[in-house]
Image (cartoon, rainbow, N blue to C red):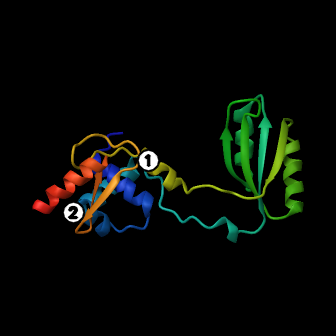
Amino acid sequence: MGLDEVDSKILRILLEDARASISKIAEELGVSRPTVRKRMRKLVELGIIKRFTVIIDENLLKGFQVLASFKASNAEKLVRELKKMDEILEIYLTTGERNVVCIARIADLKTLEDLLNKFSKFDVSFEVSIILRTEKKPVQTALLHMIKLSCDYCGKEITGKPLVYTLHNRKYYLCCPTCLREFNRKMRRR
């Protein structure tokens, strides 16, 4: 996709805080605001950043969630039908016998009954479970390790969680404790 180090660092900052201002990002990266603005616009235009959004705590929502798995001979057709349903939040095509899985938000037991009746009309085998509790990391946290960064000291690609060195509100990413120590020495000599 043609992402360079600055793009990767912008993405990393936005994954940690989607509300980070252009000024804050520019300061952390040691680049100009117009550079950040232009890079963010490019990331949106390329479809790398799909949208800036609010994530609401699911505990504030009424009702409950349902997990449904289907054994469909024509998975694409089933997916098209599921996409039309307001209750469906997420749809997954999977491997294995149950090849379509979806998550729905249901307001009450009557709504659940209506949903089950809709599923029955698809003429496919399905199972439904009520989700009692969700334990998941925010997607942003899970994606942080997937953004390629290079060490600001030795230049190697950072694998795993980078070490972060902050100086005058600017962030530097380092691959290991040795690079961190040497980078720290180098910066103190300036």
At mark 1, the secondary structure is helix
* Quadrant where the image shows the N terminus: top left
Q: Within the image, what quadrant is residue 190 found in?
A: bottom left
Left or right, 134 with respect to 171, comes to right
Task: Tell me which amino acid carries mark 2.
Answer: Ser
Q: Residue at x 30, y 54 (%)?
A: 39
**Closest to the observer: 87 or 184?**
184
From the image, state whether disc 1 or disc 2 is nearer to you: 1
Q: Position of residue 163 (x, y in %)?
A: 34, 53
Q: Residue at x 34, y 49 (%)?
A: 8
User: Which residue of the protein is positioned furthest toward the bottom in this rendering?
Assistant: 60
**Closest to the observer: 114 or 6?**
6
Task: Tell me which amino acid carries mark 1.
Answer: His
At mark 2, the secondary structure is loop
Left or right, 94 with respect to 52, comes to right
Disc 1: which residue: 145
Image: 113 above or below 62: above
Image: 98 above or below 173: above
Q: Position of residue 172 (x, y in %)?
A: 27, 56
Q: Residue at x 31, y 47 (%)?
A: 176
Q: Within the image, what quadrant is residue 71 found in?
A: top right
Q: Position of residue 145 (x, y in %)?
A: 43, 47
Q: Within the image, what quadrant is residue 80 found in?
A: top right
Disc 2: which residue: 32
